Amino acid sequence: MSETNSVLDQAVAVLKHNDRGLYTIPAHQMYPHQWLWDSCFIAIGLRHLDIERAKIEILTLLRGQWKNGMIPHMIFTPGKAYRHDREIWRSWVSPFAPDPEDVCTSGITQPPMLAEAIVAIGQKMTLVERRGWYRQVFPALVQYHMWLYRDRDPHGEGLTLQIHPWETGLDNSPPWMHELHEHLLPWWIRALEKTKLETVVGWFRRDTKIVPRDQRFTNIDAMALYDTQRRLRRKSYEIGKILDHALFAIEDLAFNCILIRANEHLLEIAKSIRAEVPADLLLSIDLTRKSLEELWDPYTEQYYSRDFVTHRLIKVPSIASLLPLYTGVISKERADILVKTIENEHIFGPSFPIPSAPLNTPWFNPRRYWQGPTWFNTNWLIIDGLKRYGYKHHADALIEGSLELVKDGHFNEYFNPLTGEPLGTPDFSWTAALTIDWLKK
Ligand code: GLC
């Protein structure tokens, strides 16, 4: 068996191992439910193996859609074992949530990768099949994007806001953790931090029993994230009430970049089936494309996330800084500036591409979750963008560098970008799925 073949077979085996029939869990033990953007990346890999199964992955995700159009970031696996997880969220406090007896979900969303997954699946079909597939999912997709603007762009600015770091999928990413520590840490968590009593919290954490502590977020950050989630629940996940006194309300750069690309896909789908896109949505889509430039800072020559209320840029770089490449709407000149940082070994270009935080910032930690390690999904987004900007050579090199990380069959959640060491939970679905996509394309 050639090396490529065996890596492919091993990746396929990981997806099989995590397959729950109608959806794929990200990993055993740590992530036993269905996650929004995970399922989208998984479907992008699955389409090469079994197109019907890839469609099912997405259709199962859509079963969780709320009556207001939101697609939740998690759909819980039924059964007694997970009662506690469902109870933490209690999504039934919202009148929009689906009947929990039928399908039980979280109360927030995740980056809108749905349109990308739909189109990726469509690429593997004949024209007739593709149109059928698009017609089947288009209404849910439009509802989702309309919800994103209605609920998350209340001032019609074009940029959507996120209310919890989990919504960005980059849970403890430096800009959000910077905001948390500078402005938003509740007094009781600060007190625990001072007295060092926070270590007690460690005893109750499930994640750090599975993965070494230094590879996950800190106890303080974990407490703050759960505290924020509890506040959202207390407000029944209702955006009006949440924004009255928001702890976090950030127009996240990564989320909005993914939305821009998703909007382009939505328009393409609509065109292909000659479906009408609601006029309001068309206006918002256009505005979002233009608004990205408001996140550009000419002094540091970078894009950043922005505080929703004050419009202050949060000038802390992270992997999100590179995602404007994925949108396809920035100028070639801007793209060149970003590519230079990938080429620079002291910024985003260490041995194993691409670190989730740049090496030249105090946040960089090669082992800690979204504060340094390399993740396959962000690599995939950046590579896709680079290809569309004509950086074929860079894209190929990044694919090669990513595949190097899994050549020994370790499809971990993330990797040390300096040494290539596999980190986080093993047998992680999107690492396997995106490996398949690169090998099969
Ligand atoms: C972690 C990641 C998030 C992912 C989830 C399930 O929380 O930060 O992006 O969706 O795990 O894999």
Image: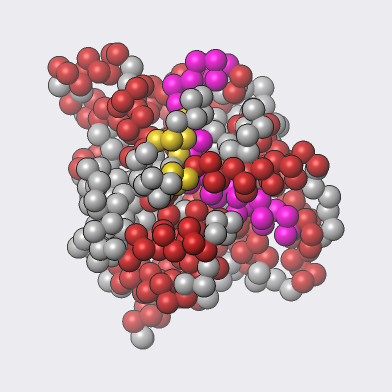
Side of 96 relative to 375 (left or right): right
The rendered magenta stretch, by its main secondary structure, is classed as helix
Asked whether residue 264 is drawn in magenta, I would say yes
- Residue span colored magenta: 241-269
Q: Where is residue 122 in the image (x, y as percent from the top left)?
A: 68, 65
Most foreground residue, 79 or 400: 400
Q: Residue at 28% x, 38% y: name it.
A: 217
Q: Position of residue 337 (x, y in %)?
A: 41, 60
Side of 197 relative to 1 (left or right): left
Residue 392 visible to the viewer: yes
The figure's colour scheme reads secondary structure
Q: Of all residues shown, which one is farthest toward the front?
A: 299
Q: In which quarter of the image is residue 193?
A: top left
In the rendered view, would you say 296 is above or below 150?
below
Q: Position of residue 434 (x, y in %)?
A: 46, 64
Q: Residue at 74% x, 73% y: name it.
A: 126
Side of 350 relative to 328 (left or right): left
Asked whether residue 255 is drawn in magenta, I would say yes
Q: Residue at 64% x, 27% y: name it.
A: 154
Q: In which quarter of the image is residue 243?
A: top right
Most foreground residue, 81 or 28: 28
Q: Of all residues shown, which one is farthest toward the left?
A: 195
Q: Quadrant of residue 432?
A: bottom left
